[in-house]
Amino acid sequence: MANQSNTDSFFERVYEVVKLIPYGRVTSYGAVARYLGSGQSARMVGWAMNLAHVTDASIPAHRVVNRVGLLSGKHHFIGKSMQQRLEEEGILVKDDTIVDFNTHFWNPEKELSL
DNA sequence: GTGGTGACGACAC
DNA sequence: GGTGTCGCCACCA
């Protein structure tokens, strides 16, 4: 069909999933990547976030961290600090790492039941 | 068209 | 147990 790239790419999928992250919850790049079926392409998720805040500022990229809960992308964030935003959502962040990451972790595979 | 890079993750040594 | 390397796919020069 006519519409191929643009909205059905692996990239767009990342946006959709990230936007589905509920308030006060966080997820990891690997979790999203695995949900998309890429598994080891967690880097793409991170890269997607890079364009995410340029393509769609509505994407809560601050809710996406690496697998240990470390705010790896805080340095890339513009405007308010990533940690600041998380704390405003009730997520405690210490030493650039999410406290009780396991408790706040939002698994797309589980929540989306796929 | 090719090469290099990138907000990660898992494995090997 | 820490360090190093590969893999993965998309974007930029």
Image (cartoon, coloured by chain):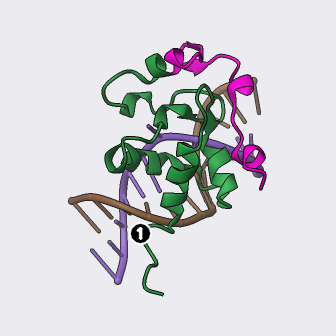
Chain colours: A green, B purple, C brown
Most foreground residue, A63 or B3 = A63
- The residue at which mark 1 appears reads as A6
Name the amino acid, label 1.
Asn
Return the residue nearer the eye: A92 or A90: A90
> As displayed, is residue A95 above or below residue A70?
above
Magenta-span inclusion, residue A89: yes
Residue A42 x/y as whole percent: 59, 50
Identified at 68% across, 61% down, the residue is A37
Residue A100, given in percent of the width and then of the height, sits at 71, 18
Q: Residue at x 44, y 24 (%)?
A: A82
Give me the chain letter of mark 1: A
In this view, C1 is above or below A7: above
Could you say where residue A11 lies in the image, as x and y percent from the top left?
49, 59
User: Is A36 above or below relative to A3?
Assistant: above
Q: In the image, what residue occupies the spot 44% across and 79% down?
A: A3
Q: Is residue A82 magenta?
A: no
Determine whether, in the image, residue A38 is placed left or right of residue B10.
Answer: left
Q: Quadrant of residue A26?
A: top right
Q: In the rendered image, which quarter contains the C terminus of chain A?
A: bottom right
Judge the density around disc 1: few (<14), some (14-19), many (≥20) Cα neighbours within 10 Å.
few
Residue A66 quadrant: top right
- What residue occupies the far bottom of the structure in this picture? A1
Q: Position of residue A69 (x, y in %)?
A: 62, 28
Which residues fall within the magenta stretch?
A86-114
Q: Secondary structure at mark 1?
A: loop
